[in-house]
Amino acid sequence: MAQQARDTSTIIDCGKPMIIGSRACALPRHARHIPIAGRSKTIIGYRSLCEHQIFPRWGGQRIDRLLPEYIEDGYAEMLAAGLAASTVVKVHAILSSAYEIEVKRGNLARNPCRLVEPPRLPQADKSGLSIAQARVVLASVEKRRNAARWSVGLACGLRQGEALGLRWTFLDIDGPDGEPGVMRVWYQLQRLPWRHGCADPAACCKRRHKRPCPKRCPKARASGRRHVCVATDANGLCKPGCTGHAAQCPVRTGGGLVFRETKEHRRKVVPLPWPLVQKLRAHRARQNRERLAAANIWEDSGVVFAQENGRPLDPRADWQDWSDILAAAGIPHKGTHAMRHSAATFGLDEGTALAVVQELLGHSDIRVTRGYVHVSSALAADGAERVSRALFEPTATKTATRAR
C-alpha cells in the first residue's frame, strides 16, 4: 500500500508514515513546543485550536491518508456545531501550514488542504463613531480619571493593548510649547493564561475539576447544604487527567498582564499634535499628584494610564469604562476597537492619503486600510456628487463654462 501511495505521488518515502498528532509530525511540534517565553495570544489561540479541534477530529490518522473530502467533512461538522467561519478559517490555516512543512521536508508530495476551499468570511464591521459622537465622548470624559486615554484612542487609533501598554519613557512631550510630540508604540499590554508551576498539575487542582456525580450522590441530602448534582452530559466536564485550572495553582507562573511587542513586531512612531500633547501633560501632572497621595501604596509601573495604585489598567475594566462612557453619552454600544475604526475614518474623510493612514495605524497591508473607504465616508459622497454632476447637469452649462 505504501509503495502504491508513493507511485501515485501521495508520499515520497515508502517507510513508516507519520500520524497526525504524533511527536514527529509538524503540527503538534508547532502546537506544543513553541517556546513559552516568545508566545503571544495568537500562538495560544492556535494551540487551543489544535488541542480542541484538529487533534480530536483528525488525530491518529496517517498524514498521507487525510483526504480533502475528510477535511471538508470536518469543516462542515465545525460549522454545524455553531463555530464561527473565522474559527474554521484559522483551523484551515494551521492545518495547511503544517502540511506545507511536511512537503518541504520530503515527507509528503502534496498538501491536501490546497484542494479544500475554506468558508468565506463575512465583511468585518468597521463602523466607528461620527465626528459629532466623538466630540460628545471627549466632552463627557473631561472630569474622569485617565481622560486622556480616550483622546489618544480616538486621535491616534491605537489598539486597546497598545494604549494600555504606553509608558512615559516612550513619549516625547517636553518640547517647546506649540511643538508636536512623538509617541513610540513599541509594546502592548496583554493578558496571558497562567501555567502550572507544580510537579503534578492533575492533582494540584483536583477540587476544581468538574466531574459528573455518581448515581447515588452522597452530597444529595434532604436537609442541610443544598447540592445540585452534575449530570454526565453537562457542559464543561473535565476529562480524565485534566491539567487545567492553572490560575488556582499556588505556584502558578507565566500569566497575568505582561508587556509584549506590538502585533506587527515593528516599532511604530506616531506624531502627537499640540492639543494632544497638552492633554498628556495635564494627565501626567494629575498622575504625579495621585502618586504623592498614594505614598507607599503606589507601584511605579511607568504606564501612562494607570490604576489609583500605579498598576496598569486591566483591559476588562478599560472595556467597561468605555461601555459606560458610551451609555452616558447616549451612543449605541461599540467595542474599544471602534476608536481605531473612527481614527481611520476621520483621517480619510479629512483627505489624508491612504498610505499615510496606513503608516499611522500600523497596518501591514494597505488593503486593510482601504477597507475603511466605505460608502458612508465623505470621500465616497464627494465622488458620487461629482459623477452626478457629470451625468445630470445640463450640457449647455458645462460647455459655456469651458468656453470661458
Image: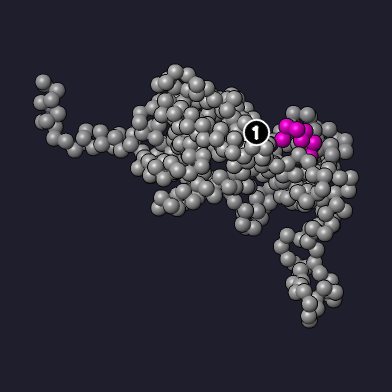
Question: How far across and how far down the image is residue 262, in percent?
Answer: 61, 31
Of residues 334 and 324, which is closer to you in this image? 324
Question: Residue at the location (42% across, 25% down)?
Answer: 274
Of residues 18 and 333, which is closer to you in this image? 333
Q: Which image quarter: residue 114? A: top right
Question: How far across and how far down the image is residue 130, in percent?
Answer: 38, 42
Question: Residue at the location (61% across, 44% down)?
Answer: 314
The type of residue carrying mark 1 is: Asp
Question: Residue at the location (82% across, 59% down)?
Answer: 207
Q: Tell me if residue 390 is in the magenta stretch.
A: no
Q: Is residue 374 left or right of residue 56?
A: left
Q: Which residue is mark 1?
A: 300
The colour scheme used here is one colour
Question: How far across and how far down the image is residue 156, in percent?
Answer: 47, 32
Which quarter shows the N terminus? top right
Q: Tell me if residue 36 is in the magenta stretch.
A: yes
Of residues 286 and 157, which is closer to you in this image? 286
Q: Is residue 192 above or below residue 205?
A: above
> Tag 1: Cα neighbours inside 10 Å, few (<14), some, or many (≥20)?
few
Which range of residues does the magenta coloring cover?
A: 32-41
In this rendering, does residue 162 appear at all? Answer: no
Which quarter shows the C terminus? top left
In this rendering, does residue 39 appear at all? Answer: yes
